[in-house]
């Protein structure tokens, strides 16, 4: 029977360019549950280590984080010492090996392709292929996941042997702003940074320009942590140290817009906002308003019963398209009681009906 030839172009289109964080959680988890080791590659700072931590927690397994590039091979694979009576060499394993053998564990080999030596790869091969170090076999419930950078990044990358690669299931974690924003809600990322990334998307979230400091999911989270610890006069310098000068300038330009939003007045007094006129119609202002008001009601300022209609008034503001309403509701989902409190309000019921109808219409 003749084979059907497929062009390189067709094959390239059929292959995914990578998966989002949320897509990979069940994919990688299913592989590990099946006893298959996984190699996850992606740009520096996109969340590979975070994915490993979240999976280990979801699988209820203690995380054993091994940074290959920062360890001597003997620290990973142990050292041999002579037994003079038996005239043999015995292996003295490191503590992590004893842990992985004594109970189900999540072994995470980070930076597996970051300038590691052949000795590193030999140890990694035994961990991945045989789930053991020397005669010390891992617990049957122990799983192995590895992570590394992409070849096109400005990071030192050592090609892995084909034998080692062939023992992994391979996935690429791509940059995805929407998924990062979902994660940012859980992680408590500064709402002005969330609003900025929500407005600008992937290009603002990750841009490895080759400079020592550049924007990535990791460095934006770093910037979020440093903001409350730095005097306002030095905040731009601190953020620039994390994400680079250019990204910091663009973020603080947006932050000035964000600072114009008086969320307390919008919710407290029901101050109307018309997003169809002037500067209020600018997408940057709309994003800033949505995130500012959502952050206000979700982070320590729950509206009183008397203020609940003001929330609905804001959500039904002229020019606030359904996508922004959905964005607002996603930002406040950590306050599940808020939506429950809004449900009895007729105007919110009508808004919810329109959102459902619109979603159904998109699937027809």
Image (tube, helix red, strand yellow):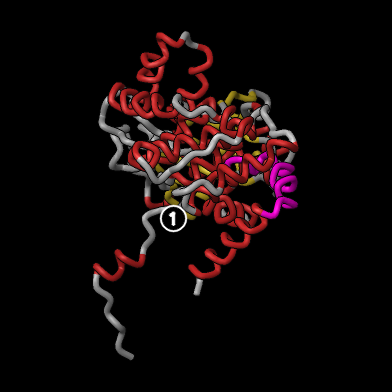
* Left or right side of 2 for 223: right
- Label 1 Cα neighbours within 10 Å, binned few <14 / some 14-19 / many ≥20: few
Image coords of residue 135 (percent x, y): 63, 40
Number of labels in the image equals 1
Residue at the outermost bottom position: 1
Q: Identify residue for label 1.
A: 166
Q: Residue at x 57, y 33 (%)?
A: 266
Is residue 332 within the magenta segment? yes
Part of the protein shown in magenta = 331-346
Q: Residue at x 66, y 45 (%)?
A: 142
Q: Observer-nearest residue: 188 or 8? A: 188
- Residue 246, quarter of picture: top left
Q: Residue at x 69, y 55 (%)?
A: 346
Is residue 363 within the magenta segment? no
Q: Observer-nearest residue: 220 or 154? A: 220
> Is residue 111 among the parts visible in the rendering?
no
Q: Secondary structure at mark 1?
A: loop
Of the 4 image quadrants, the one containing the N terminus is bottom left
* Left or right side of 10 for 273: right
> Is residue 259 among the parts visible in the rendering?
yes
* Left or right side of 90 for 191: left
Q: Observer-nearest residue: 91 or 124? A: 124
Image coords of residue 169 (percent x, y): 49, 55
Q: Residue at x 73, y 36 (%)?
A: 306
Image coords of residue 113 (percent x, y): 39, 38
- Residue 60, quarter of picture: top right
Image coords of residue 317 (percent x, y): 51, 46
């Amino acid at each position: 029977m003749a084979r059907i030839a497929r062009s390189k172009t067709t094959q390239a289109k059929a292959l995914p360019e990578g998966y989002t964080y949320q897509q990979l959680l069940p994919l990688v988890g299913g592989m590990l549950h099946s006893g298959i080791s996984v190699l996850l590659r992606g740009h520096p700072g996109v969340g590979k280590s975070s994915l490993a931590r979240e999976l280990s927690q979801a699988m209820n397994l203690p995380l054993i984080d091994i940074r290959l590039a920062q360890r001597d091979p003997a620290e990973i694979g142990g050292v041999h010492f002579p037994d003079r009576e038996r005239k043999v060499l015995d292996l003295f394993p490191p503590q992590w090996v004893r842990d992985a053998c004594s109970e189900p564990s999540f072994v995470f080999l980070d930076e597996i392709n970051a300038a590691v030596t052949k000795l590193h790869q030999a140890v990694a091969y035994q961990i991945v292929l045989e789930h053991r170090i020397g005669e010390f076999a891992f617990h049957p419930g122990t799983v192995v996941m590895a992570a590394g950078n992409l070849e096109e990044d400005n990071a030192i990358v050592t090609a892995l042997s084909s034998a080692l690669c062939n023992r992994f299931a391979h996935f690429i974690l791509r940059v995805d702003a929407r998924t990062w924003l979902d994660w940012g809600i859980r992680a408590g990322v500064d709402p002005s940074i969330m609003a900025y990334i929500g407005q600008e998307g992937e290009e603002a979230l990750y841009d490895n320009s080759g400079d020592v400091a550049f924007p990535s999911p990791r460095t934006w989270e770093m910037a979020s942590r440093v903001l409350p610890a730095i005097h306002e006069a030095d905040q731009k310098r601190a953020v620039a140290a994390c994400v680079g000068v250019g990204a910091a300038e663009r973020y603080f330009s947006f932050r000035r817009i964000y600072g114009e939003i008086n969320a307390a007045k919008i919710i407290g007094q029901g101050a109307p906002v018309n997003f169809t006129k002037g500067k209020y119609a600018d997408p940057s202002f709309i994003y800033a308003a949505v995130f500012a008001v959502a952050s206000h009601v979700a982070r320590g300022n729950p509206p009183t019963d008397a203020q609940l209609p003001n929330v609905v008034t804001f959500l039904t503001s002229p020019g606030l398209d359904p996508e922004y309403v959905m964005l607002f509701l996603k930002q406040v989902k950590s306050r599940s009681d808020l939506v429950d409190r809004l449900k009895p309000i007729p105007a919110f019921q009508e808004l919810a009906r329109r959102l459902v109808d619109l979603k159904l219409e998109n699937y027809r």
